[in-house]
Image (cartoon, rainbow, N blue to C red):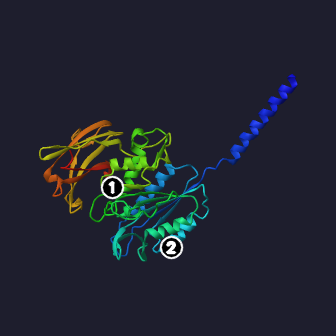
């Protein structure tokens, strides 16, 4: 009897092990993430943006390499393609090996334009290599990506990019499908800002791309991953971007997606002078507005606040006011020591401009050349209660 029981237990163990092996064999294999990063700086019909597009691509390449799985591959394409056919070809080449379990990510930094048509305004991205230039419409992007198996992620740093998903105006969402995730830098009627070397001393990435880098690298865990999952969803990233990127309104599709897209590494390096930036609720005080700000300086750093008035529905950077931080180290005002900082910025009606609103940006400076970098921004107005 004892031998029979032992034999029965052994058989049960073998069946259980075989079952586990079968489940493991049938479990879906983790997919591969492939990324195509396109940055256009040289245009035929519009002003150039060099080096913002190239720097955007460089920033995104480093960001995706750090916050996506190890089996992620990244392809860069700078100043081109200049035609829709060229776009379709590089997309096909980049994602030729994609399978149903894979993710194909496209990032584009370029000009976005609105044009009048028979059915009203429509939006297009400019494809340009400085010699050839064509307009890339949402339906052409959708058609090219529909040929690729698996899930697709589209990230756009371009003016009017919200028109791609019907955000910022009463328009069509061209990517309304469970196969797509989309993140755009601004609404359909908004501009997406960058540092222009011809008119501004600042050189670097576009404001949105820089904000995305800051959101993932320099946010406190509860700011970027409030549920503590170790992964950042499209919804979590969008909400954080809306909290620190004031130059335009960030939108995404689908708005309520909690699917983890980015992984937070255990050895995350901030890559930023300031961490945990947060803006409190602005309050009207007579003819002024008071904005509370909190952040943490990871090292000694110079900080300035840029106040950009609103004018004619856009930001008037030419009339921006720049104020150094009140802290002093030695004789240098604006040079901060490491540690937590709480500030209250007071903006008068004159600073807010004719629209009664302003973009407030926190800018840090690094190196002997004091290279500036926008750490965060928000919008305040006399209507803030």
Q: Helix or strand or loop: what does disc 1 sit on?
A: loop
Q: Which residue is mark 1?
A: 249
Quadrant of res 310: bottom left
Where does the N terminus fall, quadrant-wise? Answer: top right
The spot of residue 12 in percent (x, y) is 78, 33
The spot of residue 143 in percent (x, y) is 51, 69
Against 120, residue 286 (above or below) is: above
The spot of residue 56 in percent (x, y) is 41, 59
Say left or right for 74 vs 337.
Answer: right
Determine the residue located farthest toward the top in the rendered image.
2
Q: Helix or strand or loop: what does disc 2 sit on?
A: helix
Tell me, yes or no, whether the two marked residues, 2 and 1, touch with CB atoms within 8 Å: no
The spot of residue 337 in percent (x, y) is 30, 37
| Residue at the spot 45% in from the left edge and 39% down from the top edge | 227
Q: Which residue is mark 2?
A: 86
Q: How many marks?
A: 2
Note whether residue 133 is visible.
yes
Say left or right for 190 vs 266.
Answer: left
| Residue at the spot 52% in from the left edge and 50% down from the top edge | 68
């Amino acid at each position: 009897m004892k031998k029979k029981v032992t034999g029965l237990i052994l058989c049960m163990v073998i069946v259980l092990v075989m079952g586990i092996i079968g489940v493991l064999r049938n479990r879906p294999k983790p997919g591969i993430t492939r990324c195509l990063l396109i940055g256009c700086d040289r245009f035929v019909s519009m002003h150039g943006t060099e080096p913002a597009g190239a720097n955007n691509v460089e920033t995104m390449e480093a960001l995706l390499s750090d916050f996506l799985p190890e089996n992620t591959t990244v392809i860069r394409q700078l100043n081109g393609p200049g035609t829709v056919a060229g776009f379709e070809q590089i997309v096909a080449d980049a994602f030729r090996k994609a399978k149903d379990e894979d993710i194909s990510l496209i990032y584009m930094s370029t000009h976005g334009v609105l044009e009048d048509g028979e059915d009203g305004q429509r939006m297009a991205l400019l494809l340009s290599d400085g010699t050839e230039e064509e307009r890339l419409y949402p339906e052409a992007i959708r058609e090219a990506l529909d040929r690729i198996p698996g899930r697709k992620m589209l990230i756009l740093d371009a003016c009017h990019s919200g028109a791609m998903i019907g955000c910022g105006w009463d328009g069509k969402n061209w990517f309304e499908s469970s196969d797509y995730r989309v993140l755009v830098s601004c609404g359909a009627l908004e501009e997406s800002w960058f540092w222009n070397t011809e008119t501004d001393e600042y050189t670097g990435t576009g404001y949105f791309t820089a904000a995305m880098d800051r959101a993932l690298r320099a946010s406190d865990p509860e700011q970027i991953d409030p549920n503590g999952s170790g992964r950042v969803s499209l919804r979590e990233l969008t909400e954080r971007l809306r909290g620190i990127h004031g130059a335009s309104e960030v939108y995404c599709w689908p708005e309520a997606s909690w699917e983890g897209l980015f992984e937070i590494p255990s050895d995350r390096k901030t890559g930023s002078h300031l961490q945990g930036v947060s803006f409190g609720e602005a309050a009207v005080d007579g003819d002024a507005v008071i904005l509370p700000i909190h952040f943490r300086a990871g090292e000694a750093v110079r900080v300035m606040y840029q106040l950009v008035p609103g004018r004619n529905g856009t930001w008037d950077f030419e009339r921006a006011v720049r104020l150094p931080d009140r802290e002093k180290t030695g004789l240098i005002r604006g040079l901060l020591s490491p540690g937590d900082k709480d500030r209250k910025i007071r903006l008068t009606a004159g600073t807010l401009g004719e629209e009664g609103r302003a973009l407030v940006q926190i800018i840090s400076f690094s190196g002997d050349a004091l290279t500036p970098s926008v750490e965060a921004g928000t919008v305040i107005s006399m209507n803030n209660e």
